[in-house]
């Protein structure tokens, strides 16, 4: 025995000569240790039945008792037969996939036969050196113990451990211990596999829905999964391939023109022209000429015949934005076009037939304007054949982050920026803001953030001042300097953990602090490290 006591049978280099000469009383301590480990594992399972929570404590207990060089819990998909390491110990963070290749053959034999395997891995050690650095590779003479994990008489995975080949304790003793542990975690492993299966099914369903949405007229450059935007997708699918007049309702900046383009692109007219006209952009004296065209000499300055927007959109689609802003005189002429499908150029009395699909949009209250005799009721009913309401961004909060990620990718590429994400503090500001300018305002905010950010993430200070204004209640609570510094420190730690995938050592290096200090800060701020795992 060494001076650490009778329980220290193993080390990374194998047992010492004193340990090999240990008396029988010391060896009996092994049974006590095994019972203690089993008891501790049972207590761990009582606290949580999630394999993700209990696997690391179990592997560390095995490492302390058995002196294992490395260990892994591998689960197998019973339908596809694919294997994946769920948890591992004693290997670099990014080495799990490479290690699975090394033990794959042994694990496959165990899963197929249902019996444990013991392999002397002198040859395996040489292969390991090609995958891991010398400091990470265990000793040359190790033994691989691989035990099946059973649940409901079905083999669903394995526990694989590498221990020193010169161990004083027999392989049969270690196999017995590992087999008992495998029996204890069988049900937890089953739950884990079921969770994997559910995630796989959700991914398949998500892909199927995305394909379905794409086939059914998903809006170009529009992102969203909220119920309001899904309803827009559905209505686009129903009305796209028809001549029906569509009226798009919604606040400014909600994406009405993008919906109009989607209606055109998913119709039989997609090869025809798509003509847009903003009815609020020009004075009344010019709107009529722009829409219907004019003959030579029709008015001062009309030096030649000119086709209007309706003629230009023949066999295609015309999009009339801000239709609520046109004058009563233009309203009456537009009504005739919708009724007769004919236009007359300014200065001419000859009707011209047009084959045009009309899509109109407005952010105004047309019903109120009708009540005030500002907008013609008969024109309203002609336009409002198939209304589509676009919800404001404040009613689709769950889409904010999806839209933000979309705009980050768009503008980071356009500006050659290395920004890839948004910090937690910035996300809080985005989600809590009321967005009067809707998606257009969000896009502008992200473009600004891309230009100001110097690192890989958009921070809260990179967002416009309008997003950072506090409401009256928040202003009443005055934060101290210590509180502000603590909030900043927490945000930086969370960002570092996100970037490192919950690797505390790497996150500590990024922030220029020791791993011990990082652990103390994480405990202080109550940060859940597991949620940032990649």
Image (cartoon, rainbow, N blue to C red):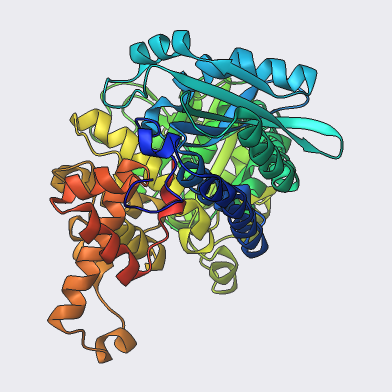
Residue 369 against residue 513 in the figure, above or below: below
Residue found at the far right of this picture: 153
Residue 301 relative to residue 362: left or right: left
**Which residue is at the front of the view, 439 or 109?**
109
Quadrant in the picture for the C terminus: top left
Which residue appears at 40% of the width and 15% of the height?
Answer: 128
Quadrant in the picture for the N terminus: top left
Residue 363 against residue 147 in the figure, above or below: below
In the image, residue 225 lies at what x, y percent?
Answer: 58, 47
In the image, residue 391 lies at what x, y percent?
Answer: 55, 57
User: How many circles with numbers are drawn on the protein?
Assistant: 0
Residue 279 relative to residue 152: left or right: left
**Which residue is at the front of the view, 402 or 367?**
402
In the image, residue 403 lies at what x, y percent?
Answer: 43, 46
Q: Residue 40 lies in what quarter of the image?
A: bottom right
Judge whether residue 504 can be spotted in this image: yes
Residue 469 against residue 321 in the figure, above or below: below
**Which residue is at the front of the view, 255 or 68?**
68
Judge whether residue 235 can be spotted in this image: no
In the image, residue 22 lies at what x, y percent?
Answer: 46, 42
Which residue appears at 61% of the width and 31% of the height?
Answer: 357
Residue found at the far bottom of this picture: 476
**Which residue is at the front of the view, 61 or 379?**
61
Residue 334 relative to residue 420: left or right: right
Which residue appears at 46% of the width and 46% of the height?
Answer: 64
């Amino acid at each position: 025995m060494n001076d650490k006591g009778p329980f220290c049978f193993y080390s990374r280099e194998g047992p010492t000569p004193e340990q090999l000469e240990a008396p029988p009383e010391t060896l009996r301590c092994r049974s006590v240790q095994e019972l203690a480990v089993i008891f501790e594992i049972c207590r761990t399972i009582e606290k949580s039945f999630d394999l993700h929570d209990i696997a690391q404590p179990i592997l560390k207990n095995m490492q302390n008792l058995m002196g294992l060089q490395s260990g892994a819990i591998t689960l197998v998909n019973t339908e596809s037969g694919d294997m994946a390491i769920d948890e591992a110990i004693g290997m670099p963070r990014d080495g799990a996939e490479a290690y699975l290749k090394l033990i794959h053959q042994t694990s496959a034999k165990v899963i197929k036969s249902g019996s444990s395997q013991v392999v002397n891995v002198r040859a395996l050690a040489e292969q390991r050196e090609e995958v891991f650095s010398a400091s990470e590779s265990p000793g040359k003479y190790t033994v691989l113990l691989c035990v099946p994990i059973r649940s409901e008489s079905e083999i669903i995975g394995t526990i694989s451990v590498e221990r020193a080949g010169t161990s004083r304790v027999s392989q049969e003793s270690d196999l017995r211990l590992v087999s008992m542990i495998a029996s204890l975690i069988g049900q937890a492993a089953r739950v884990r596999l079921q969770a994997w299966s559910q995630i796989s099914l959700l991914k398949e369903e998500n892909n199927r829905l995305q394909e379905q949405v794409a086939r059914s007229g998903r809006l170009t450059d529009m992102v969203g999964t909220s119920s309001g935007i899904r309803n827009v997708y559905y209505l686009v699918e129903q009305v796209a391939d028809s001549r029906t007049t569509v009226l798009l309702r919604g606040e400014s900046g909600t994406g009405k023109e993008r919906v109009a383009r989607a209606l055109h692109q998913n119709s039989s007219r997609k090869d025809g022209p798509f003509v847009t006209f903003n009815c609020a952009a020009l004075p009344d004296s010019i709107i009529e000429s722009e829409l219907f065209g004019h003959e030579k000499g029709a008015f001062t300055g009309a030096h030649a015949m000119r086709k209007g927007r309706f003629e230009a959109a023949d066999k295609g689609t015309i999009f009339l934005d801000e239709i609520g802003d046109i004058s009563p005189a233009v309203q009456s002429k537009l009504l005739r076009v919708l009724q007769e499908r004919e236009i007359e150029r300014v200065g001419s009395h000859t009707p011209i037939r047009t084959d045009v699909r009309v899509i109109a949009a407005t952010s105004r209250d047309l019903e109120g304007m009708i009540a005030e005799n500002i907008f013609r009721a008969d024109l309203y009913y002609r336009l409002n054949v198939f209304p589509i309401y676009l919800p404001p961004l404040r009613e689709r909060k769950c889409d904010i982050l999806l839209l933000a990620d979309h705009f980050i990718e768009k503008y980071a590429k356009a500006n050659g920026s290395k920004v890839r994400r948004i910090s937690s503090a910035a996300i809080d500001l985005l989600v809590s803001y009321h967005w009067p300018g809707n998606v257009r305002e969000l896009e502008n905010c992200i473009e600004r953030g891309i230009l100001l950010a110097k690192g890989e993430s958009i921070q809260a200070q990179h967002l416009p001042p309008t997003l950072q204004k506090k409401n009256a209640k928040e202003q009443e609570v005055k934060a101290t300097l210590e509180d502000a510094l603590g909030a900043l420190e927490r945000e930086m730690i969370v960002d570092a953990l996100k970037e490192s995938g919950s690797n505390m050592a790497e996150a500590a290096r990024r922030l220029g602090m020791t791993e011990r200090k990082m652990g103390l800060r994480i405990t202080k701020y109550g940060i859940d490290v597991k949620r940032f795992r990649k």
